[in-house]
Amino acid sequence: MVECYTPKSLDEALAIRRRTGARPLAGGTDLMVQYKQGVGITPVFPFPVMIISGIDELKGIETCEDGSVLIKALTTPSQIASCEAVPYLVRAAAGRMGAVALRNSATIGGNIGNASPKGDLPQPLILLDATVILRSQDGERELLLDDFILGSKKTDLHDDEIIYAVRIPKVEYSYIYYRKIGTRRANAISKLSLSALALVQDGRIIDFRASSGAAGPKVIRSHEAEALVVGQRLEDIQAILPGFLAAWDAAISPHAMPQYRRNTTRRMLEHFLTTVATAPQEGVIE
């Protein structure tokens, strides 16, 4: 028999979490699959669980005074995809997550807490320097999502903490790009995903970022490679591309179809930067 709790408030959930170590369960789209026993058989969890789907304090999207966007842990991908306040890259990733039923039941807290290298939402969130807010009975702590996710299925979540929300800071850009590659357009786990953005002023790139999912034990983002692009004039992009792509290659995991991921990522990054250098107008690059 699985030890199960159904807290009605966040305070109650935090008390249960500290007392029992019970793991939060909301949409269950990761945990239910991970511990399934077979078709029609109830999953067996080797740990106590608490069903938190009824806690309203963990639901909703808010725009903060500083322009950042706060997405609470139980917000679904469908809600994220349809909210204009959420940055485009995150909406694009949320709108391509699996089937409609999954997008209506999964949660952003579960997607980042599961820490799968193929998770859809961590990739653009890490690009945007999003932070995760964690709550316990002792208070709150906030850290970069890139620091929270330590590796495949590993996070910095303490035994008495619950993911409360994700905060996305306001980021200016001139051009953005998002691409998810799977075996089919819908209902597919990522084989590779890529987000990129560039801010251009007076013919010079003053901010450039790129992140890749499903290319290693966690989302790949190379600050060293990005630094090679920042400060460059648009007419010099072609000249610095070989060095930039070589630096990006070095960041990709040598395991799990390395040549496919390297070649595909190189083509996407080259396409994005070449288009940025020649695009007649700003916006989303296809």
Image: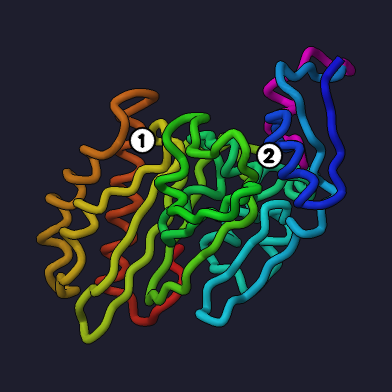
Q: The N terminus lies in which quarter of the figure? A: top right
In the image: residue 117, left or right of residue 265: right
Whether tag 1 and tag 2 are in contact, CB under 8 A, the answer is no
- The residue identified by callout 2 is 187
Query: Residue 211: where, in percent of width, then height?
Result: 38, 50
Tell me which amino acid carries mark 2.
Asn
Query: Residue 63: where, in percent of width, then height?
Result: 62, 75
Kindly identify the residue that appears in the image at 23 percent across and 73 percent down: 205
Regarding mark 2 in the picture, which secondary structure is present there?
Answer: loop
Tell me where the magenta segment starts and ends, as one range.
25-41
Which disc, if any, is residue 261?
Answer: 1
Q: Residues within 10 Å of mark 2 (few under 14, many from 20)?
A: some
Kindly identify the residue that appears in the image at 35 percent across and 32 percent down: 260
Is 24 rendered above or below residue 280?
A: above
Regarding mark 1 in the picture, which secondary structure is present there?
Answer: helix
- Say how many tags the image has: 2
**Real-space Cα distance between discs 1 and 2?**
21 Å
**Outermost residue, bottom direction?**
202
Is 70 rendered above or below residue 151?
A: below
Kindly identify the residue that appears in the image at 29 percent across and 26 percent down: 254
